[in-house]
Amino acid sequence: MGTGDLILDRKAQGEFVSSLIRQFKYKRTDFRTIGGFGGFTSLIDLGTFALSFNTDNVGTKTLVAEEANRYDTIGIDCIAMCANDAITSGSEPIAMVDYIQLRNADSETAKQIGTGLNVGAQIAGLTIVGGETAIVPDIVSHIDLSGTTVGIVQKSQIISGEKISEGDVLFSLGSSGIHSNGFTTARRVLAANEIHINDKFPGESKTVADELLEPTRIYVREILDLFNIVNLKGLVNITGGGIRNISRVKDMRYIIDSPVEPQNVFKQIMQLGNLDYSDMYETFNMGTGFVIVTDEDSKRDLVSTLRGKVPVKEIGHVEKGSGIEVPQYGVNFKGYY
C-alpha cells in the first residue's frame, strides 16, 4: 500500500461538491441568505437576527466504535462536528436534530449513543429537539451518525472573516487528539501495520480504541467567553482538510511559523504510514482543533480569558497574498481543495 492509497483525493471531492452546488438554482424571494456556499455555516436573515444551520457526521470513526463495541463517545463527536462549525460565524448553537442510520436496532448501542449525545449537548449548551432513526440493512452495514444544528446570532455580531487584514495574528486552540477527521487514513495505516483495536497504541499506555475514540473537543463555551472582549476577526474549525480550512474565512496569506507540537497519535500515524507533513496537515488537525484570527491589541485579553480552559498558543500571522504555509515543515497550500 503506497502513500497515495492512504490519502483521500481532495481534488475529486472538490469537483463533486462544486458539481452538486451548481444545481442549486431555486431560491425563495421572501427571505434572503447571508453569504454564499463554502463557509462553515449557512445563515438566513431574520431581520435583527440570523439563524445558522450546520450538518455533519462522525464519519468512519463510527467503524472504530463498532470494532471496539464502544459507542458512548461518538455522540459527543456528532455534537462537536456541528457546534464547532456553527460558532465560527459567531452563532450560538441552540438546538439540534440527530440522524442515526444502521443495519439493526440494539438498545444498548442506542443507550450509549444517547449518553454521548447528551454529554455533547450539555457541553455545547444546546437542546436535542428530535431526530430520525433509520433501520436500513439493504443500504448500510454499519452505523452512520449525523446531526443538524440551528443557531442564532445578532446580525451586527456575525463573524465573516472579511475584516481580516495584514498583520493580524493566528491563535491555536488545542485539540483533544485526532477528533473526527482523518479516520479513513488512520485506520488504513494501523491496519497495514497490523495494529489492532485492543493493542497498546504505539508510544502510549492506552489502547488503540482509547486513543482513537477520545471525543472531539467542543469550543462553543470558550468562543462565547471571548465575545465583547476580543476582536474576533476570523474563526476556523480545523476539520476535514486540516489547516486548509483557514483559507475558507478569507483569501489571504496565512503563515504558521510557530505550529503546535502535534500529539503522539499524529507522529505515529505519520511514521507508520510513511506520510509527509503536507499529507498530515491537510488530513489531520495536528494538535490545533480551532484557529482564531485577531489583531495585535487583542492578544493579551484572548490569552488571559482562555487560560486554564483550553490550550492556547499564538502560531502565526496574516500577510497579503494567498495560501497557507508552515515554513518549518515545507508545507504550502493554495485554497481549500
Image: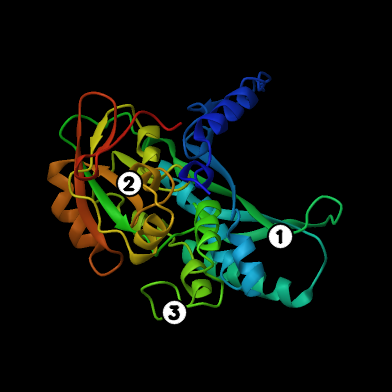
Judge whether residue 158 can be spotted in this image: no
Can the viewer see residue 106? Answer: yes
- The nearer-to-camera label among 1 and 2 is 2
Judge the density around disc 1: few (<14), some (14-19), many (≥20) Cα neighbours within 10 Å: many
Q: Amino acid at mark 1?
A: Ile
Q: Position of residue 102 (x, y in %)?
A: 77, 59
Q: Which mark is residue 277?
A: 2
Tell me the crowding category of disc 3: few under 14, some 14 to 19, or many 20 or more residues within 10 angstroms, Cα based. few
Residue 257 in percent (x, y) is at 18, 44
Confirm or deny contact between disc 1 and disc 2 (CB under 8 A): no
Mark drawn on residue 206: 3
Residue 236 in the image: state x and y as whole percent: 37, 44
Per the rendering, the mark at residue 143 is 1
- Answer with mark 2 or mark 3, whichever residue precedes in sequence: 3
Query: Which residue is found at the position 49% from the left and 38% from the top?
Result: 49
- Rate crowding at label 2 as few (under 14), some (14 to 19) or many (20 or more) other CA atoms within 10 Å: some
